[in-house]
Amino acid sequence: MSVLSCVNPIIFFFRPLQIMNELWSETQTRIIALNKNYVSKSGGVVIGIWWFLFILSNFVGKYLLKTAFKDETLDELISSAQVTMISDMMQIIEALLVIFIVTQISNMEAKLSEEVSLAGGKVIHL
């Protein structure tokens, strides 16, 4: 189902955000179930900013694609170059946020693995 969220235009608008929020919160919920002293980290703002930039850069990219095939004047070329630079900056920030989010989730999963081991459970490392 998560693969379809990248293809289906309607699901595209909400499902990837749901997946990221679920990974963030459910991993912490499982850690707290094993370790009551674990302090939960809020990721809503970071995930929200990432999602906003993801959607915005998608629309800017579609705009740039439409304007790429027009006959352009010098002013239009300058304007297009400026929009391209803004789009590139948004995508860099978006990529840095994704790296941060994935790193945080990876750290949470490592903590979950540690808590499962401490509770006597078996952890299978792939």
Image (spheres, grey):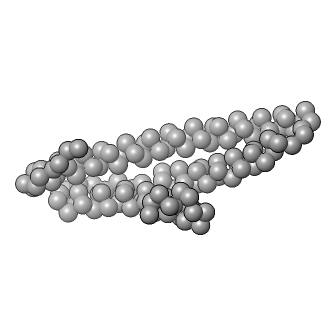
- Side of 40 relative to 36 (left or right): right
96 on left or right of 65 = left
Report the residue that reaches farthest toward the left.
120
**Placement of 56 over or under 92, stated as above or below:** below
The location of residue 75, given as percent across then percent down, is 90, 36
Viewport quadrant of the C terminus:
top left
Asked if one can make out residue 7 in the rendered structure from this viewpoint, the answer is: yes
Count of all numbered marks drawn on residues in the image: 0
Provide residue 25's location: percent of width, then percent of height.
35, 60
Q: Nearer the viewer, residue 104 or 67?
A: 67
Q: Position of residue 119 (x, y in %)?
A: 10, 55
Q: Residue at x 80, y 41 (%)?
A: 68
Please tell me which residue is depicted at 64% across the width and 48% down the height of the picture.
57
- The residue located at (49%, 44%) in the rendering is 97
* Residue sitting at the far right: 73
Quarter of the picture holding the N terminus: bottom left
Relative placement, left or right, of 12 versus 80 is left
Observer able to see residue 17: no
Asked whether 62 or 42 is in front, the reply is 62
Q: Residue at x 59, y 50 (%)?
A: 53
Q: Nearer the viewer, residue 108 or 44?
A: 108
In the displayed structure, does residue 6 sit left or right of residue 57? left
Residue 7, horizontal then vertical, whole percent = 56, 58
Q: Is residue 109 above or below residue 71?
A: below
Above or below: residue 35 compared with residue 125: below
Picture layout, residue 89 above or below residue 113? above
